[in-house]
Amino acid sequence: MIPVVALVGRPNVGKSTLFNRLTRTRDALVADFPGLTRDRKYGRAFLAGYEFIVVDTGGIDGTEEGIETKMAEQSLAAIEEADVVLFMVDARAGLTAADQALADHLRVRDKTTFLVANKVDGIDGDSAIAEFWGLGIGNVYQMAASQGRGVTSMIDQALAPY
Ligand code: GDP
Ligand code: MG
């Protein structure tokens, strides 16, 4: 089985930027994944010697009625179908209540989760990420998805068991 990696996190943390980087080199969009839905985007990725399916979430713009419920629902569904979760937060914006809520769910659900602090380009990453240790997920991986920094090493660690 090809492992499934879900990108979850509140809007604007850089999930789609990472998804596009992981999938852009080929005709990667997957059309026949079980449970395929418009609310989540599936792509085939090859990196660090691994082939995997990457799932993007959050294709809604924040103005819909019941937005929080909808986002939560698709994040939860993506988490359920994933082998590995990349939980993304914004190192520039800092810790938010939405990050905390997702972290609480991931801890209860006990899924293999890697916490990724994105947008560390041009800032002091080590001090920016310090507060994210408080989410209780474990190690905080630094990334700048738009620069491709930290992406390969993240995938290399996340997919090591596969
Ligand atoms: P999503 O809502 O989680 O899918 O976030 P997007 O991928 O749409 O990114 C939200 C914004 O953050 C966009 O303006 C991106 O260009 C920007 N962004 C994404 N990754 C990075 C990064 O590594 N560094 C910086 N500085 N900006 C980023
Ligand atoms: Mg997005």
Image: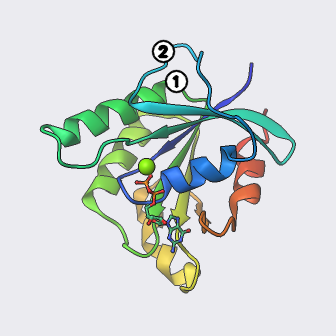
Residue furthest to the left: 65
Disc 2 secondary structure class: loop
Estimate how packed mark 1 is, as few (under 14), some (14 to 19) or many (20 or more) residues with alpha carbons within 10 Å: some
Residue at the image position 29 percent from the left and 54 percent from the top? 98
Q: Please name the residue shown 56% across and 79% down the image.
A: 125
Q: Is residue 100 above or below residue 1?
A: below
Q: Residue furthest front?
A: 27
What is the three-letter code of the residue carrying label 1? Glu
Amino acid at pointer 2: Gly
Image x and y of residue 66, in percent = 14, 37
Which mark identifies residue 35? 2
Q: Nearer the viewer, residue 30 or 68?
A: 30
Q: Is residue 120 left or right of residue 63?
A: right
Q: Position of residue 121 (x, y in %)?
A: 58, 79
Q: Could you tell me residue 51's position as x and y percent?
A: 78, 34
Which one is in front in this view, the residue at disc 1 or the one at disc 2? 2
Q: Residue at (79%, 42%) from the top-left corner?
A: 160
Residue position for label 1: 81
Q: Nearer the viewer, residue 73 or 126?
A: 73
Figure quadrant of the N terminus: top right
Tag 1 near tag 2, CB within 8 Å:
yes
Q: CA distance from mark 1 to mark 2?
A: 9 Å
Q: Mark 1 vs mark 2: which is more N-terminal?
A: 2
Viewer-nearest residue: 114 or 92 = 92
Q: Establish whether ligand 2 lies closer than 8 Å to the Cβ of label 2.
A: no
Disc 2 crowd rating (10 Å Cα; few below 14, some 14-19, many 20+) is few
Q: Give the SS element for disc 1.
A: helix
Residue found 30% across the figure and 39% down from its top: 71
Relative to 65, 77 lies left or right: right
Q: Residue 122's image quarter?
A: bottom right
Which quadrant holds the C terminus?
Answer: top right
How far from the left and from the top, in percent, is residue 19? 58, 47
